[in-house]
């Protein structure tokens, strides 16, 4: 059986966008900020979002909207990537997938509006399902401030951070808690990921560029030694070199799929 032809390569670029374009109902691909959860119920809990090495809460890094054509159960599909950003650890990575059919309890059957909706400028920390989100990171928040009963957190670390950065003063001002969410310096800067299909490039050109780079860096290595090195090249090495060749065409891209 003949191998399936590879699909088009898509490049992703981080660009500024109005806040309403990055909300869940717009099905965004984005970097940073709070996660725009696709499924508004059964979110991953604090245990799943803790670094396996240091135990601290992971930070949301990016999400990609990636529906699967022909799959009714994945008409909407998003991938979420979290990472540990606490030095000297910075080691944990966790990926979550969430998918929904077109007809579901959270979103309209029709495509989202292309215009801004009222109220989207506010930080929403409670989902339609009733679940509360952490004021610091935007993840599921099973903990509640014992004094005001209105501020919710994913962990003791984030409750302590929020208390130090303003909740201590705002705690008794119940009418302002949901509208006063300070910058905790925990989230990454937020940008929309805009994808474009890579223009076709002649294979001969790419191969020549790769060859020039190799010969220029290897200098006068004997041919026999080069042959021996090539024979021991692993599958992972080949894939990584292909990846490097692709991203070299557009160094500013943030996402590579194909």
Image (spheres, rainbow, N blue to C red):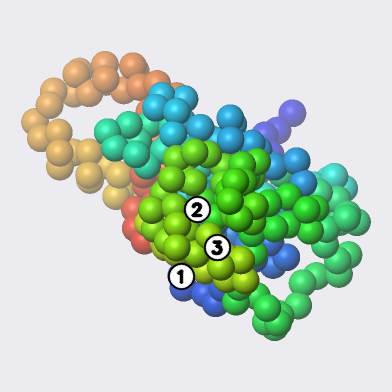
Percent from the top left, x then y, of residue 136?
50, 53
Secondary structure state at the residue bearing disc 3: loop
Vertical side of 116 occupied by 54: above or below: above
Q: Would you name the residue on which mark 1 appears? A: 15
Q: Would you name the residue on which mark 3 appears? A: 172
Left/right placement of residue 178 relative to residue 92 reads right
How far apart are the alpha carbons under marks 1 and 3? Answer: 39 Å
Vertical side of 74 occupied by 48: above or below: above
Vertical side of 211 occupied by 222: above or below: above
* Residue 136 disc label: 2
**Among numbered discs 1 and 2, the one appearing first in the sequence:** 1
Q: Nearer the viewer, mark 2 or mark 3?
A: 3
Q: Nearer the viewer, mark 1 or mark 2?
A: 2
**Among numbered discs 2 and 3, the one appearing first in the sequence:** 2
Residue 115 occupies quadrant: bottom right
**What's the residue at 19%, 18% (across, down)?**
225
Residue 110 occupies quadrant: bottom right
Left/right placement of residue 58 relative to residue 110 reads left
Mark 1 and mark 3 residues within 8 Å of each other at the beta carbon: no
How far apart are the alpha carbons under marks 2 and 3? Answer: 19 Å
**What's the residue at 73%, 50% (across, down)?**
131
């Amino acid at each position: 059986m003949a191998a399936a032809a590879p699909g088009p390569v898509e490049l992703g670029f981080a660009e500024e966008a109005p806040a309403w374009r990055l909300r869940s109902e717009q099905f965004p691909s984005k970097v940073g900020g709070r996660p725009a959860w696709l499924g508004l119920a059964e979110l991953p809990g604090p245990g799943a979002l803790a670094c396996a090495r240091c135990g601290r809460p992971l930070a949301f890094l990016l999400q990609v909207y990636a529906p699967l054509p022909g799959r009714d159960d994945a008409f909407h599909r998003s991938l979420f990537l979290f990472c540990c950003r606490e030095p000297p650890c910075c080691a944990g990575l966790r990926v979550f997938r969430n998918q929904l059919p077109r007809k579901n309890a959270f979103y309209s059957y029709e495509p989202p509006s292309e215009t801004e909706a009222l109220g989207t400028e506010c930080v929403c920390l409670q989902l339609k399902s009733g679940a509360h989100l952490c004021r610091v990171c935007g993840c599921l928040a099973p903990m509640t401030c014992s004094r005001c009963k209105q501020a919710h957190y994913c962990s003791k670390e984030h409750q302590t951070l929020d208390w130090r950065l303003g909740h201590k003063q705002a705690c008794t001002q119940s009418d302002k808690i949901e509208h006063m969410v300070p910058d905790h310096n925990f989230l990454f800067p937020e940008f929309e990921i805009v994808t474009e299909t890579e223009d076709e490039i002649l294979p001969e050109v790419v191969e020549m560029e790769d060859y020039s780079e190799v010969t220029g860096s290897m200098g006068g290595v004997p041919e026999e030694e080069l042959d021996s090195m090539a024979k021991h090249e692993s599958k992972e090495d080949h894939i990584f070199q292909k990846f490097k060749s692709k991203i070299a065409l557009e160094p500013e891209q943030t996402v590579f799929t194909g």
